[in-house]
Amino acid sequence: MAAFEDRYYNSADGVRLHYRDYAGGEPEQPPIICLPGLTRNARDFEPVADRFAGEWRVIALDFRGRGLSDPDPQPGRYLPPTYARDVLKLLDQLGIADAVFVGTSLGGLTTMLISAMEEERIAGALINDIGPEVSPAGIERIKGYVGKPTSWPDFAAAGAAFADRAGDVYPDWAPANWERFARRCCREENGKVVLDYDMAIAQPFTAANEAVQPDLWPLIDNLKGKPVVILRGELSDLFSAETATKMVEVLGPSAELVTIERVGHAPSFDEPASIAAVERLLARVPR
């Protein structure tokens, strides 16, 4: 595993946030900023760091309430605009003018928001299995498990439980893959293995998806002309092939659509094709 340092900073509203900092790259070269999905954390991007750290500086964030970041005492702030402001605060604190964003699901939505707020911060972007439109079936599946505390005696048992629940997402995974998955999204606590996020993140997620959904297509307007990869799992129940194709059409020739075969929501970057997509993206980023 690539070497990193655990670092912390405070959000504008006083929540202590964590990120992994993998050193590398030239000072004037934009770093890779990795933003995780709804219930996930910085550990999801270990494959990205293993491939690119050293050549590029890789920074993988824990959103508030996940991983080593503190929970938010006001759960109503667990919303994408909050996460976008948290990311921008970190970039300002580190003196980072622009970056290559790799965002999975919620992290991809946060990337789109950042492009709408401060488009000059985007040197390139990989949007992983999310778009301005999402499929109701995928939302319902997520609502079925998010925010429900669960524990297991060990990581092997946790991995087996994830395989039972989500085996159709990664149909080719063996037990060792599922245990690795569990180690990325769970932690040990009081002799048990538990989910590594604040259960309260479910409250605004559920409320937001029960409200009338706004038109999010304008969020990608400022990505036009920038190096972009739209990554989609072939079996995804959240991000349809039609939406992915439309995104590439809207973004134009600077965007590439990559579909990862026999993977659902979302590609994990353990797939060689996912890492190859990041490689092609970085090759198009001015250095």
Image: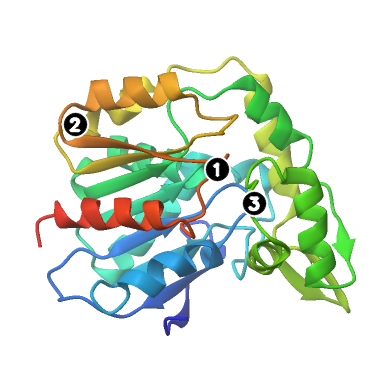
Pointer 2: what residue?
224
Q: How is the image coloured?
A: rainbow
- Amino acid type of the residue tagged 1 in the rendering: Val
- Amino acid type of the residue tagged 3 in the rendering: Thr
In the image, residue 250 lies at what x, y percent? 25, 21
| Crowd rating for badge 2 (residues with CA inside 10 Å; few <14, some 14–19, many 20+) | some
Q: Residue at x 46, y 78 (%)?
A: 7
- Foreground disc of the pair 2, 1: 1
Q: Earlier in the sequence, mark 3 or mark 1?
A: 3
- Nearest to the observer: residue 212 or residue 53: 53
Alpha-carbon distance for marks 2 and 3? 29 Å
- Amino acid type of the residue tagged 2 in the rendering: Lys
- The image quadrant where one finds the C terminus is bottom left
Pointer 3: what residue?
39
Q: Earlier in the sequence, mark 2 or mark 3?
A: 3
Query: Circle 2 sits in a helix, a strand or a loop, which is it?
Result: loop
Alpha-carbon distance for marks 2 and 1? 27 Å
Q: Is residue 71 left or right of residue 107?
A: right
Q: Residue at x 76, y 62 (%)?
A: 159
Q: Earlier in the sequence, mark 2 or mark 1?
A: 2
- Nearest to the observer: residue 204 or residue 11: 204
| Crowd rating for badge 1 (residues with CA inside 10 Å; few <14, some 14–19, many 20+) | many
Q: Residue at x 73, y 63 (%)?
A: 175
Labels 2 & 3 near each other (Cβ < 8 A): no
